[in-house]
Amino acid sequence: NMDTIEEELCRQAADRMQRVAVPVSESVSPSQTAGISYIHWPAEPSANNKKSLPLLLVHGFDSSCLEYRRLGPQLAAQGIDVYAVDILGWGFTQLDNISTFSAKAKVEALEGFVKTVLGEQAQVCVGGASLGGAAAIELAAANPDICKGLVLLDAQGFVDGVGPMAALPKPLAQLGVQVLKSYPLRSSANQMSYFDTDTFATEDAIKIGRLHCVREGWDDALVSFMLSGGFSPSSKVSTIEAPSLVMWGRQDGILDGTEFANKFVETLPNASLRWIEECGHVPHLEQPSETANVISEFLWGEELEAVTATAQNSKGGDSSSFPVGYVAAGASATAALLGIAANLN
């Protein structure tokens, strides 16, 4: 129900939302398909008539593709074809007739989305922020021939799993996820996510973050993910040889950039670091213009421009088969519910 949402960019993004059936294994769905919702912002013509890598934005923990309502249009205006996709079990994806919403199933559905929407031979620049970073790292590590670049926004990459939540009896896990959608917890998470809380930690942001939580099956899907153990990216970071951009909000109060941003640069074989000033945990929401400029600069850079040219030549200039950029964003999944819910806005 968008009637109570004030932010015009959110309403516009919701109007663009659509769903596609993507292939998954029978262990994920008896039908071997899953409905994945997404938003597409087509690239506006660039001044030099060149085409950059398309960009696929993946949201974070228990969020939705509406998380990119501010960043998507700005990237499209810079000539980048943008897709914001919901992760299986979150956002507005299919919830019925799905057997598991584990981390493995989520990555499998993302792979299916790329093949279905962007082509079987698509190459991607994969990335993520916070928990979405974990998903992106796992996707890139498992698909080095597809994933040709990496972008990380305040990403979780060195903390595996969901902590004690994975060992809870199912009834207690069900109680815990009910707390996750509560107004007090979402409000606290909202405050934790931003540097400028007066401007961004609004009632409207809380409403947007809770839109998908009222869907039937939401709680069972979240319990399934929790009990599956979550993502395990830490051992895979060093295996990703693709050019990598690490971005971090200077005032991130959830994941300390001094520790984690520098650790990414030290661990990734080919990475650079850019700080976003006057910004907390969610650069794509708090500083979308600066975030768009930095990502655009990376996608238009020499290394990724070469990948684009190679793909264009191999497909005879067919823009529908260009490589795809993959950026995921979201909140960290920590043992504490506030930490888990830190980016639910």
Image (cartoon, rainbow, N blue to C red):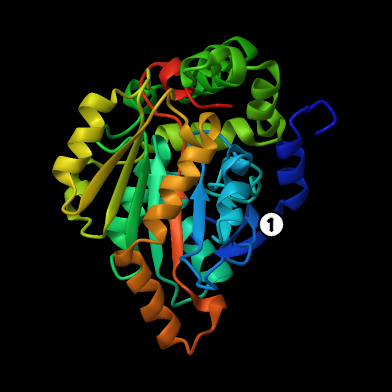
Front one among 256 and 335 = 256
Mark 1 burial class by Cα count in 10 Å: few <14, some 14-19, many 20+: some
Front one among 97 and 189 = 189
Q: In the displayed structure, does residue 311 sit left or right of residue 319?
A: left
Q: In the displayed structure, does residue 202 sit left or right of residue 155?
A: right
Residue 163 in which image quadrant: top left
Q: In the displayed structure, does residue 181 sit left or right of residue 327?
A: right
SS state under label 1:
strand
As drawn, 110 above or below 4:
below
Residue 164 in which image quadrant: top left
State the residue at coordinates (85%, 30%). Answer: 3
Q: Position of residue 197 (x, y in %)?
A: 54, 14
Q: In the displayed structure, does residue 178 sit left or right of residue 194?
A: right
Front one among 276 and 200 = 276
Residue that extends furthest to the right in the rendered view of this protein: 3
Q: Position of residue 34 (x, y in %)?
A: 60, 57
Is residue 310 at least partly visible in the picture? yes
Q: Position of residue 189 (x, y in %)?
A: 51, 17
Q: Amino acid at mark 1?
A: Arg
